[in-house]
Amino acid sequence: MGKSKTTKFKRPQFNTVGLPTNAVKEVDADEEEHEAESCPAAELLEKLQSPSADVREFACASISRVVQQSQTIPGFLQRDAVRRLGPLLLDSSLAVRETATGALRNLSACGGQEVCEDMVKHDVMTPLTALLRESCAGFEGAAVTMKDQKNAVEDVANEAVNLLWNLCESSSQSLSVFNKAGLLDLVVQCLERHPHNMELSLSAAHCLHTVTEDNPELLCSMNAAVLGVVENVLLTSQQDMAHTLLRTLAAGTLWNMKGSLPAARQAQTINAVVATLSQCLDLDAGSLIPELRQAEETRHKNTPPGADIEDQAAAELAVEEMDNEEEEEEGPKHKRNGKAVRVDNDFSDLLPRDKEELREASALLTAQQTSLEIIVNMCCSDDPSDDEWEEESSSDESDMGPDGLCDGVSNLMSPLCLSAEVQEALINHSIPEKVLRKTEFPRKEAMDVCHKNPSWRGLEKKMQRVQSRALTCLHSILSSMDAESLGGAAALQGAAQHLSTLVFSAAEIPKEEEFLEAVISAMRSLLQMIASKNISQCMTPQQLMSLSEAATRCDVVSVRVNAVAILGITGSTLAKEKGTAETLQMIGNALLQVATKDANLVVNGEALDAMFDVFADGAEAETAAKNIQLLPALKALQPVFKAKIRKEGRGRYSPQQLCVLDNIKVNLRRFIGYLEKVVKK
């Protein structure tokens, strides 16, 4: 599976149908006057200049809240909000610093990549860098008696690190500033605060995990001190979920830094990373979440009535915001370099601090999701660059047909790269078995307790996302390890039975796209491995046909591609057996339907490629081909397919995809020639 750039928690996205940020100068005077009346931006930005610190703080806090409604963002950008908020990062009042940084943080999160890039163009990195330096210098400077003041400094630093994280994951320019301005040492300094301030340390760990990924310039400057701090975090022993998440992020950072490690230490570090991920996956969210919810109820019984009404409302608002964001992020955007990515919907830092059990539950699920994504990255090849991958794939590596690849494209379809050290560590820590367990549906008891409480309801989607990430992880493991390493025929048949239960146990096949995309890619990899080893499979052709029918109605291209590939794998296996002609006819008709009617050329090509495999050889295949009139059907399809490539190809598909499609076009001509010889027999 693929990935997208790691994204911090986002509220509703900037509405791209609305006014683009680069069009702020195009609003006419009448519109501007009307917006000034209806939008609070002008008044709030004016208050930023107040001589009263309380008024400035109020204005910043209000902006922070208002920009969570994405339609208000253009009004602030038109009025130069970034330049006007920037100086307040260095305000004489710590409270103003914190709220100003929080306002920019929310602006960056709600506005998305375009707004982040605009913020960097308006030089937000200069005051942000200065703020981080001052904040980190103040960690040890505050007197012991000034505990509240010291916490205020760390609260400012926490907002600053979160803003930095948002910017670095969305803007290459800010990442370049990060590398050159020595911000790594400051973030590491924040990471070291975990004995005193876990919230700040977790923010720093998230940021560090992001900036060390695919950043060779930074890795070249990595020193032993930084490595030591990250390794010390990995060695912490506290069993709470916040520390579990902290160790998981440290493990991901060490994996990102592996190229900077001395060769003698690489195997040891990889083993430590995998051990940390293994311990995280050992935790059973299905039992822990009900326990945490029960602990919260018990604590509430001992709390005076009405004392936590405001916090309950704040928690519910945070969950609602997370739900809004997940609706915005349903599209298949998590693709890059063949690796998985955190689509980080963690909202725990927005929850009131006394919502400790909910924060723990959220940290547990975020840690498990992140662990699975790190394992996917371990299993993936780094051959294609990020830009190449994004250009090549509208869905994932399975968009390409497996046959007739052009020079320069074949590396995309080769087995994923997995070093002996990584494979040994994964096997020694039973990672394949643990990943398979995580592919199970979330336990009903956990889903029920979350559904019954509004502030916990957002965890339902997080549990489902862990399952989907586990299926993606299983796909990567199957694509990068051999059958013997995975336990041989018995283990593979057991995995196939498990996947079939996930898909076929309900009255109808699940339609949720993220789950369907993940499970069908895992199923394709598993069936391919089973077929290559001549192992009998447990799924019936009728089940696979029903899966294919459900998949062809899915909007996600990779789901449709994998569905027809599965039919091809099944059909080519059945073609070697006696008495299968009727089933092969059913498969052939389904593939013809997709090749003819699907709107996507890549899916058309995959369906044709699957037909070549199914009807390539054997008496049963010959009988089935004659019965469904395959030859005249393909002759009629051939000029249409060629015309579609010529008319639609250049504008909608990458050069690599077109290269594969051209090869399928050539193979179609040859296959028609083969069928003509069969008919003449």
Image: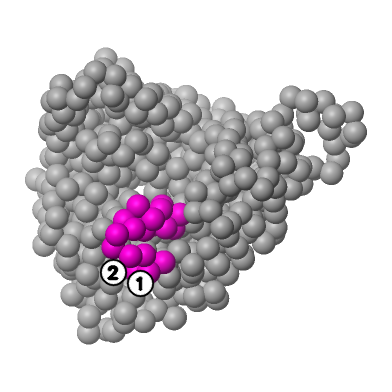
Closer to the camera in the image, 416 or 681: 416
- Secondary element at tag 1: loop
Q: Secondary structure at mark 2?
A: helix
Label 1 belongs to which residue?
Answer: 257
Q: Nearer the viewer, mark 1 or mark 2?
A: 2
In the rendered image, is residue 92 in sight? yes
- Residue 146 occupies which quadrant of the picture? bottom left
At horizontal 27% and vertical 36% (from top left) the residue drawn is 354
Seen at 82% across and 26% down, the residue is: 34
The correct choice, above or below, for 233 with respect to 354 in the image is below
Is residue 148 in the magenta section? yes
Q: Amino acid at mark 2?
A: Val
Residue depicted at 39% across the width and 79% down the height: 222
Specify the segment rendered in magenta: 138-158
Q: Nearer the viewer, residue 264 or 637?
A: 264
Q: Quadrant of the C terminus?
A: top left
Q: Nearer the viewer, residue 392 or 56?
A: 56
**Residue 366 point in image, percent of width and height:** 30, 44
Q: Is residue 504 among what the camera can see?
A: no
- In screen coordinates, is 88 left or right of 201? right
What amino acid is at disc 1? Met
Outermost residue on the top side: it is 507
Give the crowd class for mark 2: few <14, some 14-19, many >=20 residues within 10 Å.
many
Q: Which mark is residue 230?
A: 2
Determine which quarter of the picture holds residue 585. Answer: top left
Q: Answer whether labels 1 and 2 touch (C-beta < 8 Å).
A: yes
Residue at the spot x=18%, y=37% of the render? 285
